[in-house]
């Protein structure tokens, strides 16, 4: 019996033209549409609540102007933005997407978290809801709306790149829980919202790394929610303080083992405010602060982290190293009514 001829595809024939790639499956097109629809829905829902914030400030050498972004979070005109956007503001203006321009004033700022609340002269305004950043996941779709480089109502989208980053504020305190995303951000995006696909504000965009691509940072909504409540109630964020200036110092490992210390570093007290909670408790310059309320204080940042508003007026135990003698004294932190301490202070 004769052999059956071998069938070959057209592309198997030498020199034959190659056919084009097949179109993507319908499912892929649907996914693309779903992504687009998600972003569009967020923009349509929240876009009217995102404002351009312009600031007139007087600095050395004459008047100075600046601008940024912000998001309205109540219908009666409270807007959230960055503290650095309104720093030194003498006059604040807010422009909405409908073309209206409203006068505004700074209701309160918190430099340690780079957040500020602005009171806008208006009512029945569009607003966005502050969501929760507690359940964010790396890879989650997020959307930013702002006014980068003066281009109003600019939308960019991306994903959450990382969670739990730390950044240092201009006051010297560490900002914790920072959200990193690859959403395109530029100068002018500061103070604008980072949104999830439901349109909830899950962060306030605050910083980028110069000359980097796809690395942006946002203050989490959980932090913003706390700061907003404090600013609206008190006009500031209440924190505890001891009234000392300190520096990070390593402890000799042999000494740390001998004294049974939980850490091989501590906060050396460099100076004390007079009078202060620290001076009243008998702390001295030269003492090394090992722990506060039995929580190790290996650094100034760790000490500041422990001085929350809940500790104001509450007696707590401070563990000290004075020379080679380990001491325990009672200290009563006081309210930081004087404002934010300088870097290295608490």
Image (spheres, rainbow, N blue to C red):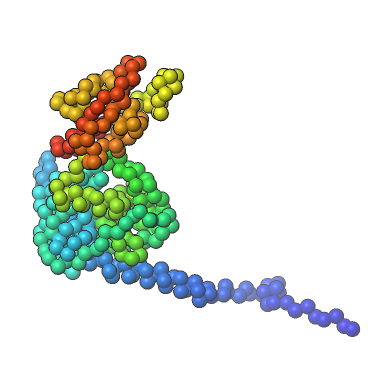
Q: Among all residues in the image, which is located at the extreme right?
A: 1
In percent of width and height, residue 329 lies at 26, 24
Is residue 11 placed above or below 331 in the rendered structure? below
State left or right for residue 14 relative to residue 126. Answer: right
Is residue 95 placed above or below 235 in the rendered structure? below
For the point 35% across and 65% down, the residue is: 197
User: Does residue 334 appear in the picture of this structure?
Assistant: yes
Q: Among all residues in the image, which is located at the extreme bottom?
A: 1
For the point 33% across and 66% down, the residue is: 198
For the point 21% across and 60% down, the residue is: 73
State left or right for residue 99 relative to residue 9. Answer: left
Tell me the quarter of the image containing the N terminus.
bottom right
In percent of width and height, residue 45 lies at 27, 69
State left or right for residue 183 relative to residue 170. Answer: right
Is residue 143 placed above or below 109 in the rendered structure? below
Q: Quadrant of residue 98?
A: bottom left
For the point 19% across and 35% down, the residue is: 313
Viewer-side residue, 48 vs 296: 296
Viewer-side residue, 276 vs 97: 276
Viewer-side residue, 49 vs 261: 261
In percent of width and height, residue 288 lies at 31, 23
Is residue 226 placed above or below 309 in the rendered structure? below
């Amino acid at each position: 019996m004769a052999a059956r001829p071998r069938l070959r595809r057209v592309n198997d024939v030498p020199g034959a033209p190659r056919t084009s790639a097949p179109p993507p499956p319908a499912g892929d097109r649907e996914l693309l549409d779903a992504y687009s629809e998600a972003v569009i829905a967020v923009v349509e829902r929240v876009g009217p609540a995102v404002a351009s914030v312009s600031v007139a400030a007087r600095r050395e050498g004459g008047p100075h102007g600046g601008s940024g972004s912000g998001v309205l979070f109540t219908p009666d005109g409270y807007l959230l933005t960055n503290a650095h956007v309104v720093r030194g503001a003498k006059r604040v203006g807010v422009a909405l997407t409908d073309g209206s321009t409203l006068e505004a004033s700074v209701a309160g700022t918190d430099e340690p978290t780079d957040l500020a609340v602005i009171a806008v002269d208006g009512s029945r305004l569009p607003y966005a809801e502050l969501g929760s950043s507690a359940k964010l996941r790396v890879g989650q779709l997020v959307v930013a709306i702002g006014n980068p480089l003066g281009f109003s109502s600019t939308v960019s989208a991306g994903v959450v790149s990382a969670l739990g980053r730390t950044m240092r504020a201009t006051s010297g305190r560490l900002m914790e829980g920072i959200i990193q995303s690859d959403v395109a951000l530029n100068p002018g995006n500061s103070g604008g919202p980072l949104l999830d696909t439901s349109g909830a504000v899950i962060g306030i965009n605050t910083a980028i790394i110069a000359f980097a691509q796809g690395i942006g940072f946002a203050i989490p909504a959980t932090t913003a929610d706390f700061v907003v409540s404090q600013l609206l109630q008190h006009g500031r964020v209440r924190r505890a303080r001891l009234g000392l200036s300190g520096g990070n110092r390593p402890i000799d490992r042999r000494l740390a083992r001998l004294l049974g210390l939980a850490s091989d570093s501590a906060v050396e007290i460099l100076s004390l405010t007079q009078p202060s909670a620290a001076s009243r408790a008998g702390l001295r310059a030269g003492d090394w602060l090992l722990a506060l309320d039995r929580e190790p204080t290996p650094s100034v940042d760790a000490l500041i982290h422990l001085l929350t508003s809940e500790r104001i007026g509450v007696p707590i135990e401070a563990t000290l190293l004075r020379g080679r003698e380990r001491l325990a004294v009672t200290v009563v932190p006081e309210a930081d009514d004087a404002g934010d301490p300088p870097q290295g202070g608490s």
